[in-house]
Amino acid sequence: MQNYLIPSEISWLSFNNCILDEAEDLNNAVYDRIKFLAIHSSNLDEFFRVKINKLLKKKTKKSSDLLENVLNEVNLQQNRFGKIWSYSILTELALNDIIYYEYQELLPEHLNEIEYYFKSIILSYIQVVYITLNQPKTYFLNNRSLYFLVKLKDSKGNYNFVYLNIPSDKLDRFKQLQSIENIHYIISIDTIIRKCLSLIFPSDKIISCNAIKLNRDENYLIEDENTGDLIAKIEAKVEERKRGSATRFLYDSNMDADSFSICKKAFKLYKSEMIKGGSHHNFFDLFRFPNPVTPKLQGAYYPNLPHLPFENNKSIFDVINKKNQLLHFPYQSYYYVLQFFNQAAINKNVTEIKITLYRISSQSLIANALISAAKNGKKVTVFVEVKARFDEHNNLYWSKEMKKAGIKIIQSLPNLKVHAKAAMITMKDKYGNKKNYGYLSTGNFNESTANIYSDFGFFTAETAYTNDLKKIFSFLKTKKKTTEPKHILAAGFNMKEKILELIDTEIKNKKAGKPASVFLKVNGLDEKDIIDKLIEASRADVEVTLIVRGICTLLPGIKKISQNIKIYRIVDMFLEHSRIYKFANNGQEKIYLSSADMLSRNLNRRIEVAFPLYDERHIEEINKIIQLQLEDNTKRRIVNIQGSNELENKDNENPRRAQTETYNWIADANRIS
């Protein structure tokens, strides 16, 4: 029997390969293609910081074989990346009068310009370390930072090795030089430093200069979260992470054997950790690659659309009181979420605000609104998940700022992460009765990512939702579970069990000859019980359709196992981040929007929320979006029986692109209204 699972690492790399598809697609504007290269680089960097170390540590044949497959695939993708950058992107830029200096000779005007910039600015940040292996000394490379290893020959004929930093953490990685005869020139600070090395080593001959970079393991485990100061432990682990073990040492493929050996010894590396790269690393800095001809060479602009019920109304709460409201980000403005909290902060009738925060903006307007609410006399309770990976420092900062303003801060439950995106505002009506207003979302309370992540936001005043929210917030406060939510599915309470029951119902309905199907749109799928249940549904001839953006360890189309399962990926200008669960339910559809993926961590080790839609108009909207995504023949990939992605043959006469059609559909609805 064919194995119906694929390793999560291979599946994730398959997703990241879709990003390269977009970078290679000549139908995309060149600066959008550059952005996709930046995304790919950022993703791969995180992969080596988070996912690879367990394979490096395991010494089994299975893990060794998987590691070899992973590194082979990474190498293929890096080679593909380099070809796209060098032979496609740079060529197209040059055709549009933008020259990126890499290996070319600099014009005399630019030589003077970069030398001035180097002497006056860059040199302020350069630190040079000589490597002397015959003396006991610790040589340390900062995680993700850029360096050069330079091989020198002194006047006596002796060879010396030094490494120096490339201060991309202090300065813009790319500098726009003066234009000459309407030709624009861009150069990296890496190249500037290479060109000016003789100013650092005036007495030595420079034999070679190779780019190097180290990724460190950024996972951490807190042995005991139930005793002692959990926050202090997290802060200590975040600091410890900066000195984590090596997971990937990238070095210039042109590096000679002596330089390679010096790196291995000086930085205490294993050969398996050393991976050939290019002459430049950290291509995620391409997010800030200058465009001297803006807006030319950039993709179409899609300004946020209004949500008409919220327009021309003094009180957002009056609108919510009349009808539940469903918003589609980033197609519609995130302004209304900010308005929800801003109005609550100053409304004299608001008595209390409760909210969960997982990842918030570093300049969070929502956090500032909560601070204002507390200073205006409202009771504000904020659950801040300080174990949100890579956002610990930001979340701890805002915890302290909000606490100083008098906000009650609840930080991190032992052995659980709170990933739910929920808020509740309590207000007194004119009779003195309490009225609760809830906000539930598939995405974070983050106004920055709301412009690029595709998510749903739901406002309600119905007690069916708010009574369940009260139970969830009560648990976060007391750590005690009382009664289960009746309508909302909550991981940590009943979510996984309810999802399994819902799939079971589809199986029973199919066997009874009734309408039956399962549709899941998530960012990841690896939870064993869910996968087993989907396979059971497939064997019962239930039609199972999955749109899984990232990791998907289930393979579709395997005879007698997953032959009735279809899996797709959509990669486009916005990050598909929303989660939808849909069940046919004998013609009485059940649809949930959720913060939870079908990953083991989400369903077994987190507090998550999935909320049902009862309004017919909202069910119609979600079905429309599902329809548009399944009819996409431009950006939708079919995941095949091997777990690879196949772009459908594009219909040039009738191209369908879900994200642009979703935008146009919402815009048309506004015009009709």
Image (spheres, helix red, strand yellow):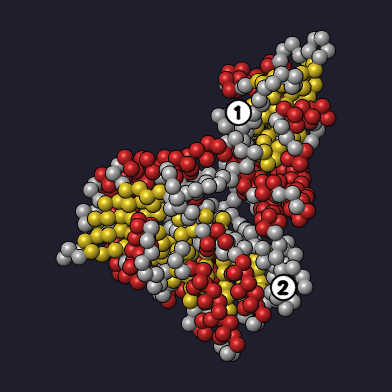
Residue under pointer 2: 557
Image coordinates of residue 230 in percent, x first then y, are 44, 45
81 relative position to 665: left or right: right
Lower sequence index among marks 2 and 1: 1
Residue placed most toward the observer, 186 or 630: 630
Residue placed most toward the observer, 148 or 449: 148
In the rendered image, which quarter contains the C terminus? bottom left
Residue beneath the point at 34% across and 60% down: 474
In the rendered image, which quarter contains the N terminus? bottom right
- Residue 339 appears in which quarter of the rendering? bottom left
Tell me how many marks there are. Answer: 2
Considering only vertical position in the picture, is 183 above or below 5? above
Image coordinates of residue 649 in percent, x first then y, are 73, 66
Q: Amino acid at mark 1?
A: Pro
Image coordinates of residue 252 in percent, x first then y, are 76, 34
- Residue 319 appears in which quarter of the rendering? bottom left
Q: Which mark is residue 384?
A: none
In this view, the mark in front (2 or 1): 2
Q: SS for tag 2?
A: loop
Residue placed most toward the observer, 76 or 393: 393
Residue beneath the point at 24% across and 56% down: 350
Q: Amino acid at mark 2?
A: Gly
Residue under pointer 1: 167
Considering only vertical position in the picture, is 341 above or below 253? below
Residue beneath the point at 74% across and 11% down: 203
